[in-house]
Amino acid sequence: KAGVTQTPRYLIKTRGQQVTLSCSPISGHRSVSWYQQTPGQGLQFLFEYFSETQRNKGNFPGRFSGRQFSNSRSEMNVSTLELGDSALYLCASSLNPGQPNSPLHFGNGTRLTVT
Amino acid sequence: DQQVKQNSPSLSVQEGRISILNCDYTNSMFDYFLWYKKYPAEGPTFLISISSIKDKNEDGRFTVFLNKSAKHLSLHIVPSQPGDSAVYFCAATNNNDMRFGAGTRLTVKP
């Protein structure tokens, strides 16, 4: 069974631009979550989607948005990029959202650098 | 707000000895706790978990202890091996989203 796939692996953008990151979950997983990882801050929760609906949202500005398609694939968009948005963006899928014994399966992330 | 805290950014132990990684949380509504392990250039992978109705869960060399009254959990690795060198994230959930700590980088020296 293929794991969680994130594309692209690396991305360099300039301030003010916008970016779209893509995530394909494990087959059969309908829940997709997005996290931002920065040094010293750990994994910061962005949002979670289930059945094309946003189920939960973290404390990020409205420049960060996402969506989920009918095949469970998800995209996240960041508009008007700032230098501080440089981070590793991780996508994770799970079988059953809200089920604590259903661990998250992470992709290898997209490394975004904003210059 | 940092609801899950890992106050030690790094830990170094000798091969064969015990590694103890600590985690504290503030939200008493959390009822399930997990540890993830992350190697460079890879996403985190699930390691072990514990429900709030238990105080200990063991899986091979890995044991997680939960002290609900202190809102504290710890991961014990015995014996530690060089392949255990990675960043360990503590996570907590209450059937909603999952919150992670900042991670502890464990280095196991041969």
Image: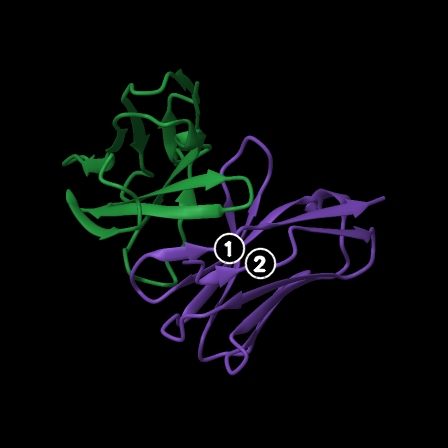
Chain colours: A green, B purple
In which chain is the residue bearing label 2? Answer: B
In which chain is the residue bearing label 1? Answer: B
- What residue lies at 45% left-to-right and 76% top-to-bottom? B52
At label 1, the amino acid type is: Gly
Give above or below for B3 relative to B54: above
Residue B47 appears in the rendering: yes
At label 2, the amino acid type is: Gln
Residue extending furthest toward the bottom: B69
Compare marks 1 and 2 and give the one earlier in the sequence.
2
Q: Mark 2 highlights which residue?
A: B6
Foreground residue among A12 and A56:
A12
Q: What element does badge 1 sit on?
A: loop
- What residue lies at 27% left-to-right and 56% top-to-bottom? A97
Report the Cα–Cα distance between label 1 and label 2: 6 Å
Foreground residue among B104 and B53:
B104
Which mark, by number, is residue B101?
1
The 10 Å Cα crowd at callout 2, few under 14, some 14 to 19, many 20 or more, is many
The image quadrant where one finds the N terminus of chain B is: bottom left
Give above or below for A80 relative to B50: above
Residue A51 appears in the rendering: no
Foreground residue among B4 and B108:
B4
**Contact flag, marks 1 and 2 (Cβ < 8 Å):** yes
